[in-house]
């Protein structure tokens, strides 16, 4: 384009060049300066032509200047003819935007996890504070659950060992006393052995005391005619004294001893009543208490009888509060096999103990008798019953003192089958306590 302009300049006439110079001056809006005016008015055509050609070249270079150069401010640095080509402006914004988004996401995630962790720690501290504030206080002195017993009267009767205190019996868990209070109320008091008598001290004795206290409060809520209810208790250091209603009939073990010595006659109707009452008591503990209560030490000495031979289960759950051992005579013969194998106790373990007691009621024999212990040792009473049942000689196992009418004998044989089912080696094969109540109550209908 510059060569074309140069050619055009060469062939222009002098008059046209003059007009072009004037037009150029008017285009920029600048009048001819006084300096240039003499030259423009010069009559010498050659000088005029040269001046006009110089002005035309100057105008040409001004029009060919890049836009970027014209758009820069006046104080900017000079522009070189060959400047380095800048990188595409789109790449730099993309890189910076990606890094910014990445930092934003990391900040959000870090803040989220930090908030969750802080909230979890805060909630955990609140829970610890609530547990500490609501923990069970360790009560001192007599704790009474019935208005019939005065705390001072009970405390005085147990602390002074008055003449009104009579020893009824003893077991691995403690001793039973008959105590007459000042208001002529008779209660049965069981003094438990110390919780850590033969063991090393517990790392947290206060926690153990709270656990025992909670268990006793749960036992105090038991209300059933076939279960002995806890009326009061006293804590003296590590020893607990529990007060129950006094049952004048004694225990089932005492009654069976009198039957064996022929001091007392106990027919099938009374023995059936005792069996049904025991099953109802177990049903209440297993299905109607919340949480369910397991007896843990069901045997004839823990079954109390009133004047009408209505049974009441005693020592419910106390074996969990003391260091009881299954090797103590009287406990081993009524314990389920899984108690020795896996030390696991369930409601079906209570059913096994019930089956042993039902077998005692039907045969009148004591499982600890040398007749059984001399043969195969522990648990041979159940194997003896099963052997007679399989041999078709189950009638030989029944107590001859209660054999009478043929109908009663059939009921006793069916009750013996129920006892053998309760004595199954597998807990799953044993019936539940509610099924026992249904089976035993239907014996008279056959």
Image: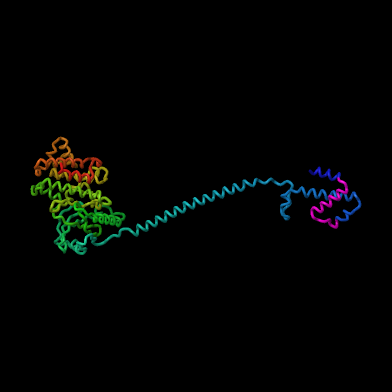
Q: Nearer the viewer, residue 121 or 174?
A: 121
**Magenta span:** 12-35
Q: Is residue 194 left or right of residue 408?
A: right
Please, which colouring scheme is shown? rainbow
> In x, y percent, where is residue 217?
26, 56
Q: Quadrant of the N terminus?
A: top right
Q: Is residue 173 magenta?
A: no
Q: Is residue 324 visible?
A: no
Q: Is residue 439 left or right of residue 202?
A: left
Residue at (44% x, 53% y) in the render: 117
Q: Is residue 435 left or right of residue 395?
A: right
Q: Nearer the viewer, residue 374 or 114?
A: 114
> In x, y percent, where is residue 374?
15, 41
Q: Nearer the viewer, residue 253 or 378?
A: 253
Q: Is residue 354 left or right of residue 41?
A: left
> In x, y percent, where is residue 76?
72, 54
Residue at (25% x, 49% y) in the render: 287
Q: Quadrant of the C terminus?
A: top left
Q: Nearer the viewer, residue 187 or 369?
A: 187
Q: Is residue 18 magenta?
A: yes
Q: Is residue 84 above or below residue 209?
A: above
Q: What is the number of callouts on the image?
A: 0
Q: Is residue 153 visible?
A: yes
Q: Residue furthest right?
A: 43
> In x, y percent, where is residue 37?
86, 56
């Amino acid at each position: 384009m510059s060569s074309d302009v140069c050619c055009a300049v060469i062939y222009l006439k002098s008059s046209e060049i003059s007009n072009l110079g004037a037009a150029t001056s008017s285009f920029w809006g600048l009048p001819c300066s006084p300096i240039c005016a003499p030259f423009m008015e010069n009559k010498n055509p050659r000088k005029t032509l040269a001046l006009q050609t110089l002005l035309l070249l100057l105008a040409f270079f001004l029009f060919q200047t890049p836009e970027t150069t014209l758009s820069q401010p006046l104080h900017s640095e000079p522009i070189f003819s060959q400047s380095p080509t800048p990188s595409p402006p789109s790449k730099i914004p993309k890189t910076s935007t990606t890094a910014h988004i990445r930092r934003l996401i990391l900040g959000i995630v870090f803040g989220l996890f930090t908030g969750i962790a802080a909230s979890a720690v805060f909630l955990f501290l609140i829970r610890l504070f609530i547990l500490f504030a609501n923990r069970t206080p360790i009560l001192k002195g007599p704790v009474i659950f019935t208005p019939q017993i005065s705390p001072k009267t009970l405390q005085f009767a147990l602390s002074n060992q008055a003449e009104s205190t009579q020893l009824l019996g003893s077991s691995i868990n403690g001793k039973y006393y008959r105590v007459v209070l000042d208001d002529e109320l008779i209660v049965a008091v069981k003094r438990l052995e110390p919780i850590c008598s033969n063991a090393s001290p517990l790392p947290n004795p206060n926690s153990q005391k709270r656990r025992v206290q909670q268990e006793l409060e749960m036992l105090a809520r038991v209300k059933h005619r076939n279960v002995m209810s806890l009326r009061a208790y006293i804590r003296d250091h590590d020893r607990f004294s529990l007060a129950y209603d006094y049952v004048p009939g004694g225990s089932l073990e005492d009654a069976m001893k009198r039957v064996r010595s022929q001091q007392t006659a106990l027919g099938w109707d009374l023995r059936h009543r005792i069996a049904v009452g025991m099953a109802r008591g177990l049903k209440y503990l297993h299905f109607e208490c919340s949480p369910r209560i397991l007896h843990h030490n069901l045997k004839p000495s823990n079954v109390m009888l009133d004047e009408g031979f209505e049974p009441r289960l005693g020592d419910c759950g106390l074996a969990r509060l003391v260091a009881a051992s299954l090797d103590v005579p009287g406990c081993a013969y009524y314990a389920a096999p899984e108690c020795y194998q896996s030390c696991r106790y369930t409601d079906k373990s209570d059913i096994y103990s019930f089956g042993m007691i039902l077998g005692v009621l039907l045969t009148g024999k004591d499982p600890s008798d040398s007749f059984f212990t001399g043969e195969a040792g522990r648990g041979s009473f159940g194997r003896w019953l099963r052997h007679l049942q399989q041999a078709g000689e189950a009638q030989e196992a029944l107590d001859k003192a209660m054999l009478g009418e043929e109908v009663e004998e059939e009921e006793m044989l069916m009750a013996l089958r129920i006892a053998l089912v309760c004595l199954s080696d597998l807990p799953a094969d044993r019936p539940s306590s509610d099924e026992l109540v249904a089976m035993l109550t239907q014996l008279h209908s056959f």
